[in-house]
Image: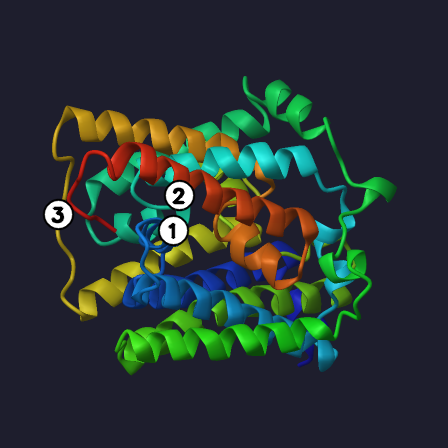
Amino acid sequence: MDFYDIIEALGEGNIEALMGLTVGLIFGVAAQRSGFCLRAATVEFARGRVGPRLAIWLLTFSTAVVWVQGAQYLGLFRVSDARMMAVPGSWSGAIIGGLTFGVGMVLARGCSGRLLVLAATGNLRSVIGGMVFAIFAQMSLYGWLAPLRNWLAALWITPGGRNLHLLDMLGLPQGVALWIGLALAGFAIALALRNRLGLRPLVFASGVGFAVALGWVMTWTLAQASFDPVNVTSATFTGPSANTLMFFLNPNPALRFDVGLVPGVVLGAFLAALVSRELKWQGYDGADAMRRSLIGAALMGFGGMLAGGCAIGAGVTGGSIFAATALLALTCMWIGAVLTDHLMDQRRPRPAQA
């Protein structure tokens, strides 16, 4: 039985969902065990430290680049086929959405992916925050906030009806991307050794990057064999959170990669926490913490949809294929997070949470 027979027997939608579930499981386990979180890395950086959180994030990002670019070199994936590259990018959306998302993830004390992982371990703050995030993402996609998002995104878009590859913009061959990934991985490992990180967090941080690459390869492979159009995509949580929410509200839902991804992350993180005995009920510390968290989650929902992806979708998944607007959004997320931490948390010390 070849891949075409499997597609015919199971159906393309079911295979997409299984692929999403697989990527989500790997992502959930690896993210839970490594403590991967963009918010934690940006806060550490904002406070003048080049420490373990930054090392973990950088290793995840660099290994995603290495795996993705290596897959392209081996003919297992083509960056040009990625949905993120096949549609117009929005410079204005990347800037405004990235800044908004960065502010939101500091207020919520975790990016959208981190909230999903923490929710699976019993963190009720993340459960509620994740639901608010998904609702505002859906509102920004099709609801009341959609006209505002569309207007802001249309202010400044990429020419030619497609997104731009950063290296093409700089006049560099795309093969340079693999060497950039290797250089960043070497720096991340050196940083991890300097901070005396053990082998386990490094392996699992690399696992998050591998999950991103696996999503790209899987969906690309299906797209080559499918008779119907298939979105070549990978791990991201803004659109998938909204789509998963609607899956349970729609009387005739369709199974897709997105719908398998989110439950996969929850299941993977839950199993990892169960094995490591880290399941623990947690809640808000008070009304102020709840208000702050909910505002942050709402800002992430709108900002992530406007930016074209969350800290994972733009920051790692989009960054791994050097989508220019994704890397701009990631930069703006860092700026928004650093400024928010400086203005709100450094002036009024709070207990560290991740």
Which residue occupies the foreground of this view, 102 or 162? 102
Between marks 2 and 1, how big is the CA–CA gap? 6 Å
The disc labelled 2 sits on which kind of residue?
Val
| Mark 2 or mark 1, earlier in chain | 1
Q: Position of residue 44 (x, y in %)?
A: 32, 54
Residue 53 percent location from the top left of the image? 33, 62
Q: Residue, x 59% and y 26% (percent of image)?
A: 142
Mark 2 or mark 3, which is nearer the start of the sequence?
3
Outermost residue on the front side: it is: 48
Q: On the image, numbered disc 2 is attached to which residue?
A: 338
Which is more toward the observer, 264 or 202? 202
What residue did someone put label 3 on? 281
Q: Amino acid at mark 3?
A: Trp
The type of residue carrying mark 1 is Thr
Assign the N terminus to one quadrant of the image: bottom right
CB atoms of marks 2 and 1 within 8 Å: yes
For disc 1, the marked residue is 42
